[in-house]
């Protein structure tokens, strides 16, 4: 399993350097422009789709067939993509947490509770993006699943940015704090991520190579 993870990390560094550069750029912009939610969500959403990009390269070099000769189960071949996504999303999220903390210290601004709630929604978005996309790609492949992949990205970006604007209204109507709303969103996305892994394993185990 460690070997599979290292292979995917090496591929991410080699083939996804341009995406990583865009992620770094938008992360830097998020430090300057904290009002635009797009710059907060974009780095995590793009990071969450890196395992899908790696799957595309796997298909191009026929790793999905070649990998069957190694002593790895189909469950491990699927699980490593979820592990890669989880590591990358959490790393990106921790970087955003550090940026927001540093920014609040420099600017001496309050409202850390609101920022924590927002950052939890950002983390939820990253997990949800991976959870929704990976089963589609494992089922149809990157070429056939490209349209569904794009639709999911648009829906997630639109829904996540709208979630924070609606959270205060929902919290007011239900007399629930935004932090509780954010924790509920994180719990729901974590469950979806786990169920997605279960579904993807079942799909891949039924595939013939």
Image (cartoon, rainbow, N blue to C red):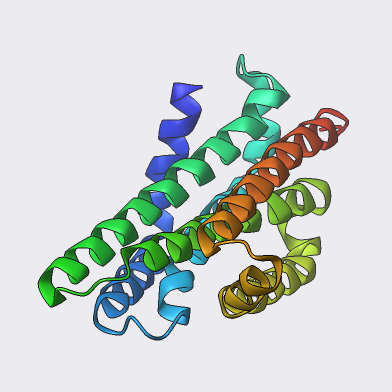
**Who's the residue at 64% across and 78% down the image?**
169
Percent coordinates x, y for residue 66 in the rendering: 65, 31
Determine whether, in the image, residue 9 is placed left or right of residue 154: left
**Which quarter of the picture shows residue 78?**
top right
- 129 or 32, nearer to the observer: 32
Percent coordinates x, y for residue 38 in the rendering: 47, 80
The number of discs equals 0
Percent coordinates x, y for residue 25 in the rendering: 30, 75
Residue 130 lies, with reference to residue 113, above or below; the image says above
Q: Residue furthest front?
A: 175
Percent coordinates x, y for residue 94 in the rendering: 33, 51
Residue 91 lies, with reference to residue 109, above or below; the image says above
Q: Which quadrant is home to the C terminus?
A: top right
**Who's the residue at 30% across and 85% down the image?**
33
Residue 173 lies, with reference to residue 15, above or below; the image says below
**Who's the residue at 78% across and 71% down the image?**
147
Determine whether, in the image, residue 186 is placed left or right of residue 26: right
Q: Looking at the image, can residue 175 be seen?
A: yes
- 107 or 180, nearer to the observer: 180
**Who's the residue at 51% across and 22% down the image?**
1
**Which quarter of the picture shows residue 19?**
bottom left
Q: Looking at the image, can residue 59 be seen?
A: no
């Amino acid at each position: 399993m460690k070997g599979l993870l290292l292979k995917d990390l090496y591929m991410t560094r080699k083939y996804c350097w341009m995406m990583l550069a865009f992620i770094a750029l938008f992360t830097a912009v998020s430090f300057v422009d904290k009002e635009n939610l797009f710059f907060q969500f974009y780095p995590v959403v793009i990071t969450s789709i890196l395992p899908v990009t790696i799957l595309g390269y796997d298909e191009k070099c026929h790793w999905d067939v070649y990998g069957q000769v190694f002593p790895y189960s189909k469950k491990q071949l699927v699980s490593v993509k979820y592990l890669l996504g989880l590591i990358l999303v959490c790393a990106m999220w921790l970087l955003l947490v550090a940026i927001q903390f540093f920014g609040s210290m420099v600017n001496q601004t309050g409202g850390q509770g609101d920022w924590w709630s927002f950052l939890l929604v950002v983390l939820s978005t990253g997990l949800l993006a991976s959870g929704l996309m990976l089963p589609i790609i494992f089922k149809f492949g990157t070429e056939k699943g490209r349209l569904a992949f794009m639709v999911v990205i648009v829906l997630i970006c639109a829904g996540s940015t709208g979630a924070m604007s609606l959270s205060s209204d929902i919290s007011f109507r239900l007399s629930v704090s935004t932090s509780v709303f954010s924790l509920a969103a994180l719990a729901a996305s974590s469950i979806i991520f786990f169920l997605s892994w279960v579904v993807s394993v079942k799909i891949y185990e039924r595939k013939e190579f």
